[in-house]
Image (cartoon, coloured by chain):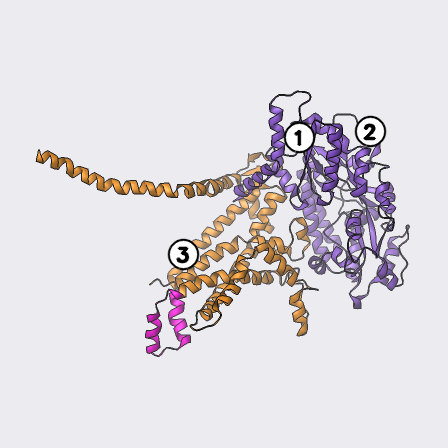
């Protein structure tokens, strides 16, 4: 059964990557300098597909011998399928990479390091660091995202609470949260979401002065008392009934509650702008503020990078394409209709697209942003985070005990890397 | 000459008689060859390969090394495996409740002179032909603690319903209800066929002897249906032990499903296998998990065949 599933997946990939194989055949006929080449480009976001195709077309204008086939795989299957494709030697020539998966791919040598000297000062340093493994850069940052507090102005007005100031603190946040909660109407201040550490726990952990993983990637930070403070920030909100309990958030995701007017605030990434400006309920009710300051000011910064398969048949052409995707020209196209481009100075179009929202907040946050914590096998300890912290979120186990258990489990996993 | 002719013809006739079954057998093999080949290539070979892989450890991107019994040792000490086996067995046992339910519905539908039988049959069978993913998504919505229809109905009679699939105390039972609901139609059709194969004379004779409808049901229908019930119980036990799609969709796929407080009570063996094979890429260990499941299924099926002597009546 296992094998049949696997071969099924391989068949699927084979079908989807048929064009990549076509490129391979062409390469086999002889390596002329001006051969026509077709590159495959693997992406996961359907909302960016049009922008990616536009970029591909723009690239072919200046590189007439290189055509690019944009291959969309939905997020839910992207990594499963990519792993199968890489194992079977059929990975796309160029594809999107994210932080949690990067080191796994780099350490196994299935993506190609960038040989040419490139000027990385045009990208946020946190993102360049994220895609550097053992001193080598493997990908050029494509876009970036930071986290902010989306808030429902209607609910703030109804509770006669002032909108969050740019320099608000944890203390301010807790006061506001108490005022915004209205049990009778079923309105909570915020949802202490457990399924997106990037938007929730990691931020408060760094704000409290804690850390998730030591800089050398060998030790868990979950037994640090300041890290635990960052977790307690959320469990306290649940205990005070200012956040729905975990069962409720399992049945109905916090973003749905926010879009139904049941949450006054929602900690969300800059990518949520697409959702909240489209949703009928939120489109004229929300705005965004920076995350409140704890011991420190902090937000998680993450971004997607374009990387090359180590086994690409056309390394030179793949690099040309990656370089183009990392250029200002590409960033300008992306910024008009996609996420925030990673290229510094190309982000203004993104902010200007929605003048009714304080989107500059997300760019200002880059100054104090912390990179998304990763190691070689990030997925393994991310599973442990959920397994252990679920018990703290339900109140079954005290948060410091759950965090200590998690630290022990995570340290074991890190030792195996 | 006559003698030679006789000696010639006799063995020839004999051989012809013999040859015919042999060629017939050949034709038979030829006809089953495509299916046989398919089974060998897509079922038998993968099973053998999986058995081999269960003794290996895999890298993230393929390539494996022989590690002997390591995976099995780890399996025995893994609390998650133990919990998944318990969950799966609980689901299987509770799911058997669907069998008496199907018999009762079948008996009601089999009553002579009942109007609109085809409407009822269709209604019962509809969940069977509906995609499990669609079924699971619909039930997920019905079970929603705050907005679900189930709790809204309960609220009318003053009951404050739980978060059915997020509460460790109720999650498995909520799942069994969906499982039984979606399989009762299939079982019912098989039982109906079984009931229609029972000779009418038996009921007539019983009626003459003064047995009422209820007594006829217990003394004739039930014993005569026992071979059918045996078949259904074998099939549904195997099906329940392989439960995956329903849980996968109801808890939400991927790692974030672990944020469901009831997750550890819902995780089935096949789901754990899926996570290890395709999410964490621990393929050797995943292979060991399914081989253990294979052994479990074989053991339970053999036990059922042994036990059938006690309750199955073949005419």
Q: Position of residue A355 (x, y in %)?
A: 87, 48
Tag 1 subunit: A
Separation of disc 3 and disc 2 at Cα?
72 Å
Kind of element beneath mark 2: loop
Q: Which is nearer the eye, B15 or A53?
A: A53
Give me the residue at 38% from left, 43% from top: B32
Q: Which residue is mark 2?
A: A119
Image: magenta residue range:
B196-225
The chain displayed purple equals: A
Category of crowding for the residue at label 3, using alpha-carbon neighbours closer than 10 angstroms: few (below 14), some (14–19), many (at least 20): few
Residue linked to disc 1:
A38
x, y (%) of residue B52?
50, 39
Residue B216 in view here: yes
Residue designated by label 3: B305
Chain bearing tag 3 is: B
Could you tell whether A215 is left or right of A86 in the image?
right
Q: Nearer the viewer, mark 3 or mark 2?
A: 2
Dot 2 or dot 1, earlier in sequence: 1
Towards the viewer: A380 or A321: A321
Q: In the displayed orientation, state which residue is furthest to the bottom.
A: B210
Q: Nearer the viewer, residue A200 or A324?
A: A324
Q: In the rendered structure, does residue B20 fall within the stretch colored magenta?
A: no
Please say if A26 is above or below A72.
above
- Chain B on-screen colour: orange
Q: Residue B128 in the image: state x and y as whole percent.
A: 52, 59
């Amino acid at each position: 059964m296992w094998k049949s599933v696997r071969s099924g997946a391989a068949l699927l990939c084979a079908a989807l990557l048929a064009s990549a194989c076509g490129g391979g055949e062409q390469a086999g006929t002889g390596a002329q300098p001006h051969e026509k080449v077709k590159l495959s480009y693997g992406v996961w976001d359907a909302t960016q597909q049009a922008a990616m195709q536009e970029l591909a077309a723009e690239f072919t204008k200046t590189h007439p011998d290189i055509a690019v086939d944009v291959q969309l795989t939905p997020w839910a299957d992207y990594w499963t399928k990519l792993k199968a494709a890489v194992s079977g030697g059929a990975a796309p020539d160029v594809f999107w990479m994210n932080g949690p998966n990067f080191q796994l791919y780099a350490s196994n040598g299935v993506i190609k390091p960038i040989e040419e000297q490139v000027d990385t000062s045009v990208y946020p340093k946190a993102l360049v660091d994220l895609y550097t493994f053992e001193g080598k850069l493997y990908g050029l940052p494509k876009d970036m995202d930071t986290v902010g507090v989306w808030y429902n102005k209607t609910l703030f007005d109804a509770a006669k609470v002032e909108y969050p100031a740019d320099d608000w603190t944890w203390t301010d946040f807790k006061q506001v949260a108490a005022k915004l909660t209205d049990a009778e109407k079923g309105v909570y201040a915020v949802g202490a979401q457990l399924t997106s550490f990037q938007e929730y726990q990691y931020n408060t952990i760094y704000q409290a002065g804690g850390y998730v993983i030591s800089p050398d990637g060998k030790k868990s930070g979950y037994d640090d008392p300041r890290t635990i403070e960052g977790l307690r920030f959320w469990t306290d909100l649940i205990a005070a009934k200012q956040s729905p309990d975990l069962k409720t958030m399992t049945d109905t995701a916090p973003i749905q509650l926010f879009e139904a007017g049941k949450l006054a605030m929602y900690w969300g990434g800059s990518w949520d702008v697409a959702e909240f400006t489209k949703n009928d309920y939120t489109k004229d009710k929300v705005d965004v503020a920076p995350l409140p300051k704890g011991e420190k000011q902090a937000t998680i910064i993450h971004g997607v990078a374009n990387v090359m398969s180590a086994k690409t048949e056309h390394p030179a052409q793949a690099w040309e394409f990656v370089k183009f995707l990392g250029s200002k020209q590409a960033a300008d196209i992306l910024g008009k209709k996609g996420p925030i481009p990673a290229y510094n100075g190309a982000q203004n179009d993104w902010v200007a697209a929605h003048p009714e929202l304080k989107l500059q907040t997300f760019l200002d946050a880059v100054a104090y942003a912390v990179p998304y914590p990763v190691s070689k096998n990030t997925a393994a300890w991310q599973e442990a985070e959920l397994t252990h912290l679920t018990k703290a979120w339900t109140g079954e186990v005290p948060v410091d005990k759950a965090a200590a258990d998690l630290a022990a489990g995570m340290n074991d996993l890190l030792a195996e890397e | 000459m006559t003698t030679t002719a006789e000696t010639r013809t006799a063995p020839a006739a004999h051989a012809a008689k013999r040859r015919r079954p042999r060629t017939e057998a050949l034709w038979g093999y030829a006809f089953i060859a495509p299916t046989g080949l398919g089974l060998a290539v897509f079922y038998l070979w993968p099973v053998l390969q999986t058995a081999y892989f269960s003794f290996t450890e895999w890298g993230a991107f393929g390539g494996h090394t022989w590690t002997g019994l390591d995976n099995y040792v780890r399996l025995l000490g893994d609390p998650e495996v133990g919990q998944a086996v318990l969950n799966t067995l609980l689901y299987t046992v509770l799911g058997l409740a669907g069998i008496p339910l199907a018999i009762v519905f079948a008996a009601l539908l089999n009553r002579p002179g009942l109007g609109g039988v085809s409407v009822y049959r269709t209604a019962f069978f509809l969940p069977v032909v509906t995609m499990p993913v669609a079924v699971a998504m619909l039930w997920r919505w019905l079970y929603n603690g705050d907005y679900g229809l189930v709790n809204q109905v309960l609220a009318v009679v003053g009951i404050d319903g739980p978060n059915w699939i997020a509460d460790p105390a109720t999650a498995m039972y909520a799942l069994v209800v969906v499982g039984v609901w979606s399989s009762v139609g299939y079982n019912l059709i098989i039982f109906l066929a079984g009931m229609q194969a029972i000779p009418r004379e038996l009921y007539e004779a019983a009626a003459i002897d003064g047995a009422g409808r209820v007594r006829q049901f217990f003394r004739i229908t039930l014993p005569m249906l026992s071979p059918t019930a045996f078949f259904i119980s074998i099939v549904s036990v195997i099906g329940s032990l392989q439960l995956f799609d329903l849980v996968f969709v109801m808890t939400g796929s991927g790692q974030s499903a672990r944020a469901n407080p009831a997750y550890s009570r819902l995780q089935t063996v096949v789901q754990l296998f899926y996570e290890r094979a395709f999410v964490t890429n621990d393929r050797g260990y995943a292979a060991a998990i399914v081989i253990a499941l294979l052994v479990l299924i074989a053991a339970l099926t053999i036990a059922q065949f042994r036990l059938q002597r006690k309750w199955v009546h073949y005419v």
